[in-house]
């Protein structure tokens, strides 16, 4: 299984927001700088997270992003389901043109593997990913920005 860059960045942004210790909203630019990634791409990811209700966007002076829900309530499996296209093969969708689909066993095997993958992710919430909060703050090297 391989997650898209969109989901990868969504998880990174959630971690970034969760390890901040101050009450000031974070900017997309600051998060992108700390990760060394495109702020334009991260802005699109942030928009998705706002639409899904994971992140709140505050406008105006002093605005930015903050978690909309506690880290203990953000399930990783649910996030992946909402941000990924889980059609591993053409036959996972409604318009399959594969001639062997009716007798193919590969689809079932891959579906079971995908369900096992998602079941593992369902067992984790954002809080589980930030148990080493202090280390993450140092690694993100924005100690001042992160509220230290």
Image (tube, helix red, strand yellow):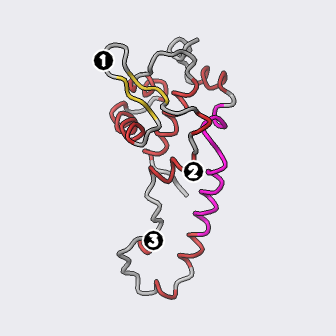
| Residue 60 relative to residue 20: left or right | left
Q: Quick one: 50 or 27, which is closer to the camera?
A: 50
Q: Position of residue 71 (x, y in %)?
A: 59, 33
Residue, disc 1: 60
Q: Quick one: 36 or 73, which is closer to the camera?
A: 73
Q: Is residue 60 above or below residue 103?
A: above
Q: Position of residue 48 (x, y in %)?
A: 38, 41
Quadrant in which the C terminus is drawn: top right
Report, in whole angstroms, how far the alpha carbon at label 2 lies from the one at label 3. 19 Å
Discs 2/3, front? 2
Total tally of numbered discs in the picture: 3
Q: Is residue 46 magenta?
A: no
Name the main secondary structure of what is drawn in magenta: helix
Q: Which residues are magenta?
A: 112-130
Query: How many neighbours does mark 1 have within 10 angstroms: few (below 14), some (14-19), or many (20 or more)?
Result: few
Residue, disc 3: 92
């Amino acid at each position: 299984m391989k997650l898209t860059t969109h989901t990868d960045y969504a998880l990174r942004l959630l971690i970034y927001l969760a390890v901040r210790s101050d009450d000031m909203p974070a900017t997309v630019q600051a998060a992108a700088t700390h990760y060394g990634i495109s702020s334009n791409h991260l802005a699109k990811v942030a928009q998705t997270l706002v639409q899904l209700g994971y992140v709140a966007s505050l406008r105006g002076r002093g605005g930015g992003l903050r978690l909309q829900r506690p880290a203990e309530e953000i399930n990783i499996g649910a996030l992946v389901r909402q941000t990924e296209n889980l059609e591993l093969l053409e036959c996972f969708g409604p318009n399959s043109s594969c001639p062997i689909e009716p007798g193919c066993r590969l689809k079932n095997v891959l579906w079971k593997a995908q369900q096992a993958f998602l079941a593992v992710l369902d067992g984790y919430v954002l809080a589980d990913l930030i148990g080493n909060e202090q280390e993450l703050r140092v690694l993100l090297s924005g100690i001042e920005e992160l509220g230290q």
